[in-house]
Image: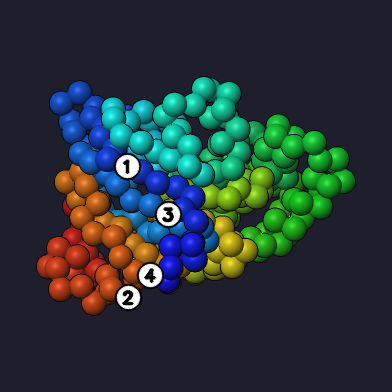
Amino acid sequence: MSAHESPEIVLEMRDVHKAFGAKVVHRGVSFSLRKGEMLGLFGGSGTGKSVLIRSIIGLEQPDRGEVLFEGRNLLTLTERQLYKVRTKIGFVFQNGALFDSLTVEENLAYPLRAHTTLTDEEIQARIEKMLELIDMKGTNDLLPNELSGGMQKRAGMARATILEPSVILFDEPTAGLDPVNTRRLTGNITKLKDRGITGIFVTHDIPAAFEICDRVAILREGVIHVIDTVENIKRSKDPFVQSFVQGAYYT
Ligand SMILES: Nc1ncnc2c1ncn2[C@@H]1O[C@H](COP(=O)(O)OP(=O)(O)OP(=O)(O)O)[C@@H](O)[C@H]1O
Ligand SMILES: [Mg+2]
């Protein structure tokens, strides 16, 4: 493939370093994400996966390095510019992110009211379409605590994507879900992917990642130990990668 045919890079980290006091989390993280690509991000607990994706939306400040979104270094943007960028990046938090006192419909309407000039009818139509996409038609008036864990996760994902961001970051969206709900959620993510969304999927659920992702990166000791296609990761002879793929590596 010649250079001009290579897919556009949407997101890139260059030599990112981050420490909390004496605790060094990232010691030179670099990778790039191409348009339409879903990147699985693996790593033991505490290796800095959440910190990494939080850095992409400015919830963490790297100590050094660059985080580029659509070619602009996010670390040099003003709060106002960053706010705008955040509307283009959906974030599905590790522990869901619905407002407890708002219904499903109100939760979904919230970003649309805050960030768009859509009319009430248009908002309603967008919500109905989204509820259908996540298999939650008719749940409009339910409160988060009236939903199952799986539904809460899917509603959280819907809220993160209702502004139709170009990039979505998932932090362990299938954690704590049973196999049926995991499949539903991964099915929903696949639908988003079919619409061309670009994303990072942080997970300990390796089979789910292999199903959804194009490439996989493994974070280890502060750096990206490996980043490659799912096929190559599965075939890797690297003992560390193998132990990960076989689910033998948990910490
Ligand atoms: N605000 C903070 N202050 C101090 N230390 C922090 C802070 N946030 C994260 N850390 C530390 O940074 C390291 C990486 O945390 P992070 O949450 O990114 O791990 P993770 O890879 O997402 O783990 P898990 O798989 O358990 O979610 C951990 O050692 C954590 O304790
Ligand atoms: Mg985490």
147 above or below 48?
A: below
Circle 1 is placed at which residue position?
Answer: 14
The spot of residue 243 in percent (x, y) is 17, 67
Q: Label 4 vs label 2: CA separation?
A: 9 Å
Position of residue 173 measured from the top left corner of the image (x, y, whole percent): 45, 54
Mark 2 sits on what residue? 231
| Helix, strand or loop under label 2 | helix
Q: Amino acid at mark 4?
A: Phe
Q: Is residue 202 left or right of residue 240?
A: right
Q: Is residue 216 left or right of residue 68?
A: left
Residue 127 in picture, x, y percent from top left? 75, 51
Asked if 157 appears above or below 185 in the picture, the reply is above
What's the colour scheme? Answer: rainbow
Note whether ligand 1 is within 8 Å of mark 2.
no
Q: Residues within 10 Å of mark 3 (few under 14, many from 20)?
A: many
Q: Earlier in the sequence, mark 1 or mark 4?
A: 1
Give the residue at mark 3.
33
Q: Quadrant of the N terminus?
A: bottom left
Sequence-wise, the earlier of marks 2 and 1 is 1
